[in-house]
């Protein structure tokens, strides 16, 4: 197996699929990856993420009434030891109404019919949100119009005024 084939395997028909890598977990631990890498130097531990499975609304037939497939992910932004303060502040601003007064980010995922896909979707959306919060925006430099730009603006206004003034003159027929 080459380097690119390290995490894939082929079945009898020759189709390639990812190799499932087993992860050892404690019995009462939430079902997420042990460490979630966000950016260089920033990783979230699975103990910081709280996953709750709820019943989803919408189509799904009898399955929607029987199985709790939607995922509600809760992440304590205010109390997270993994995030630097500047990332926490930007994350609070980016999250908007998805963050409550206590500083807990709530992401609800019910796009898919399977619990596993919704779990991956919720964790993926959390990772993208935190990753976008790690990006430091470039500060805006206030600029002023140049002297030539001011002159062009005044000249355009003057011409426009002349056009309007010429419309108003009425011929005197006395």
Image (cartoon, rainbow, N blue to C red):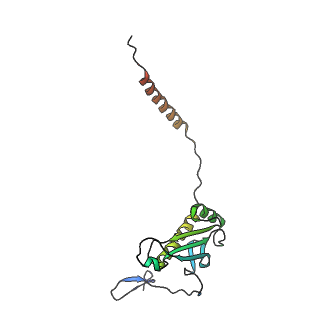
Q: Residue at x 52, y 72 (%)?
A: 122
Report x, y in % for residue 63. Answer: 43, 79
Q: Nearer the viewer, residue 116 or 143?
A: 116
Q: Residue furthest bottom?
A: 12
Q: Taking 18 as reference, is 78 left or right?
A: right
Q: Residue at x 52, y 36 (%)?
A: 148
Q: Residue at x 61, y 65 (%)?
A: 100
Q: Taking 153 as reference, is 75 left or right?
A: right
| Residue 147 in the image: above or below residue 46 | above
Q: Residue at x 59, y 78 (%)?
A: 46
Q: How many marks?
A: 0
Q: Nearer the viewer, residue 173 or 5?
A: 173
Please identify the quarter of the rendering in which residue 172 is found. Answer: top left
Please identify the quarter of the rendering in which residue 61 is found. Answer: bottom left
Q: Residue furthest top?
A: 174
Report x, y in % for residue 1. Answer: 42, 86
Q: Residue furthest left?
A: 13
Q: What is the quadrant of the C terminus in the image?
A: top left
Q: Is residue 30 in view from this perspective? A: yes
Report x, y in % for residue 49. Answer: 59, 75
Please identify the quarter of the rendering in which residue 79 is found. Answer: bottom right
Q: Is residue 135 in view from this perspective? A: no
Report x, y in % for residue 136. Answer: 59, 61
């Amino acid at each position: 197996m080459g380097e690119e084939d390290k995490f894939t395997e082929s079945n009898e028909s020759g189709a390639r699929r990812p190799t499932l890598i087993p992860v050892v977990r404690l019995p009462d631990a939430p079902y997420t990856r042990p460490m979630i890498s966000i950016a260089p130097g920033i990783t979230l531990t699975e103990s910081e993420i709280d996953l709750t499975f709820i019943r989803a609304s919408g189509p799904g037939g009898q399955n929607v009434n029987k199985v709790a497939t939607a995922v509600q992910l809760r992440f304590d932004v205010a109390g997270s030891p993994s995030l630097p303060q500047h990332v926490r502040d930007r994350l609070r601003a980016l999250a908007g109404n998805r963050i409550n007064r206590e500083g807990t980010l709530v992401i609800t995922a019910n796009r898919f019919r399977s619990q596993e896909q919704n779990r991956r979707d919720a964790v993926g959306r959390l990772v993208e949100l935190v990753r976008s919060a790690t990006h430091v925006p470039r500060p805006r430099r206030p600029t002023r119009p140049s002297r030539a730009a001011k002159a062009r603006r005044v000249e355009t206004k003057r011409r426009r005024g002349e056009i309007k003034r010429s419309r108003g003159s009425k011929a005197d027929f006395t």
